[in-house]
Every structure is written in structure tokens, then in C-alpha cells.
């Protein structure tokens, strides 16, 4: 039985009408795929050890504002994080505690942006039983002082301020990150150590923080960047950019970090 020309034309028009949305949807899917955009993403972020506490709050705030995105943080000394990136560790973004370490990763990351700053303090045992008053007291040979290793940002900053004041300190140990320095003092294995202000504030019931004057201090900068070749480049870029928003900045500054 043959179909009439009018019926055939109507059928063709209907089929075309159904096909156009499907083609458009396919085009949208391809565009999302090409741009790296995703409805959901699992991001792995390598972060400096001094961000351990505040990034717990960052995780909650970011995931609430970006449903479907899950953040997983891996904390370590910045030099360890850099080594992981160079070795191809599966991660999407990195935040270091100094620009020097980040600058060494130019071939592996996107353009970094500084999201916060920090400053040094002297952490002593609770109650400051050794009466540490400033950097000069750390030269006392009777005092057990612990510092981060020279390749660690806080260790480099520590030696920078000590050298500027011509203070010679012989540490009883050199630790792989700032949290390890703080832990030594908390446990009573050291009398004093140089840490970031924000780290000392996480242990106010176990250590005292002795202020280092501005003219003797060093300011740490925290750059964040996307790692090239990650599985979620677009989502990682969104997270890195979010760290500079008012919402993220409030979290960081409430934790004691300074403005970028």
C-alpha cells in the first residue's frame, strides 16, 4: 500500500523534529567532554602540612557549594608534594607553603595564584617554662630546639630569620614538615621550635606561641595551581579559583592566615 506524498512529508518532518534535539544534546555532550566540564568530580589536592586543619573546613564549604564534587587532600611538606608531582602522582591541584617550590613546578602546573600568607612564631612547651622571649634565646645550648629541614619551606624561613639576626642554633632534630616540628614540642621532646602562627594556634592547650617581631620575621606565601594532565582539569581550576573568593578567604583568615 503506497503512502500519500503529504503523509510522507509529514512523517519526514516529525522525524527531523525528533532528531534535532538529539543532535543538539550530542553536541552539548561533546562540548562538555572537550572542555573537561563535568557534573561531578573527585578531586585530589596536594596541600602543605600547615593547611591540614583549615582545609577540613574548606572541604565542607566547597562540597556544600558544589554538589557532586568530592575533595580529597594529601598533606605533606611542600618539597614532598613537589616530588610527588614530578613523579606523576595522580592529583589534580597543589597548594604549597612557598612560591619557590611552586616555581620549580612550572612545567607541571598551570599559572599559580597566591591564596594566603602566614608568619613565624616560636612554639614552646605549655607555660613556657624555659622563659623563651625571642629568637636570640634559641641559641642557648641548654635548650632543645627543633627545626624543619632546610629543604622544607618553614625550615628555610626559619634559617632565613635566624641568619638575619646572626643567631646560631643547633637543632636536636630536623623535621620533614611543620606539623612534625609542632608535635615534638607538644610531646615534650623539644623545648622550642619555629612554626607557623596558624599551626601554633591549633595546639594552644599544649604549646605557647612566642611572637617574632615584624622586623625579624618572614612571611610565607601559599600559591595554588592546577596540575597539568590531571583527570579533572576544569573542575580543579574551579577549585583553585574558589580559594580566592570571599567565602574561602574568610575561612582562611578566621584560621589565622593573612590576606594574599
Image (cartoon, rainbow, N blue to C red):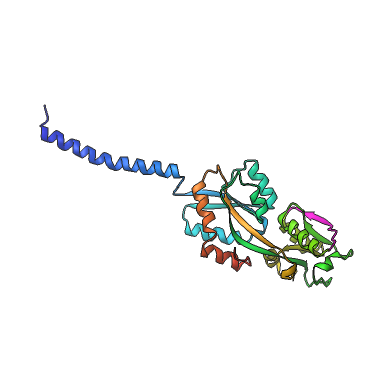
Q: Residue at x 76, y 66 (%)?
A: 123
The N terminus, quarter of image: top left
Is residue 127 at all visible to an observer of this figure? yes
Q: Split into 4 quadrants, where in the image is the C terminus?
A: bottom right
Query: 68 left or right of 224?
Result: left
Q: Residue at x 56, y 64 (%)?
A: 249
Magenta extent: 167-176
Check residue 44 for magenta coloring.
no
Q: Is residue 60 left or right of residue 53?
A: left
Is 15 positioned to the left or the right of 145 in the image? left
Residue 125 x %, y % = 79, 68
Q: Which residue lies at the image location 65% right of the left edge and 45% below the top edge?
A: 84
Give whichever of 200, 140 is nearer the camera: 140
x, y percent for residue 34: 44, 42
Quarter of the image holding residue 54?
bottom right
Q: Quadrant of residue 252?
A: bottom right
Q: Is residue 132 above or below residue 18?
A: below
Amino acid at each position: 500500500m503506497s503512502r500519500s506524498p503529504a503523509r510522507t512529508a509529514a512523517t519526514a518532518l516529525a522525524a527531523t523534529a525528533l532528531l534535532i534535539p538529539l543532535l543538539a544534546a550530542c553536541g552539548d555532550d561533546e562540548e562538555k567532554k572537550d572542555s573537561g566540564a563535568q557534573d561531578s568530580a573527585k578531586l585530589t589536592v596536594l596541600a602543605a602540612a600547615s593547611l591540614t586543619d583549615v582545609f577540613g573546613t574548606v572541604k565542607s564549604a566547597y562540597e556544600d557549594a558544589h554538589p557532586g564534587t568530592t575533595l580529597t587532600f594529601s598533606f605533606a611538606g611542600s618539597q614532598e608534594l613537589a616530588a610527588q608531582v614530578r613523579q606523576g602522582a595522580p592529583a589534580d591541584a597543589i597548594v604549597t607553603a612557598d612560591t619557590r617550590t611552586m616555581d620549580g613546578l612550572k612545567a607541571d602546573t598551570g599559572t599559580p595564584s597566591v591564596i594566603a600568607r602566614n608568619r613565624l612564631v616560636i612554639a614552646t612547651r605549655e607555660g613556657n617554662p624555659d622563659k623563651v622571649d625571642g629568637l636570640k634565646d634559641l641559641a642557648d645550648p641548654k635548650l632543645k630546639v627543633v627545626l624543619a629541614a632546610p629543604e622544607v619551606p618553614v625550615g628555610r624561613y626559619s634559617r632565613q630569620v635566624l641568619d638575619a639576626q646572626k643567631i646560631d642554633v643547633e637543632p636536636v632534630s630536623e623535621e620533614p614538615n611543620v606539623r612534625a616540628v609542632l608535635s615534638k614540642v607538644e610531646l615534650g621532646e623539644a623545648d622550642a621550635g619555629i612554626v607557623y602562627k596558624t599551626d601554633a594556634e591549633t595546639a594552644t592547650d599544649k604549646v605557647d606561641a612566642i611572637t617574632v617581631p615584624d622586623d625579624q620575621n618572614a612571611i610565607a606565601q601559599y600559591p595554588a595551581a592546577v596540575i597539568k594532565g590531571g583527570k579533572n582539569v576544569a573542575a580543579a581550576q574551579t577549585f583553585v579559583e574558589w580559594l580566592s573568593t570571599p567565602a574561602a578567604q574568610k575561612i582562611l583568615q578566621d584560621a589565622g592566615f593573612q590576606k594574599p
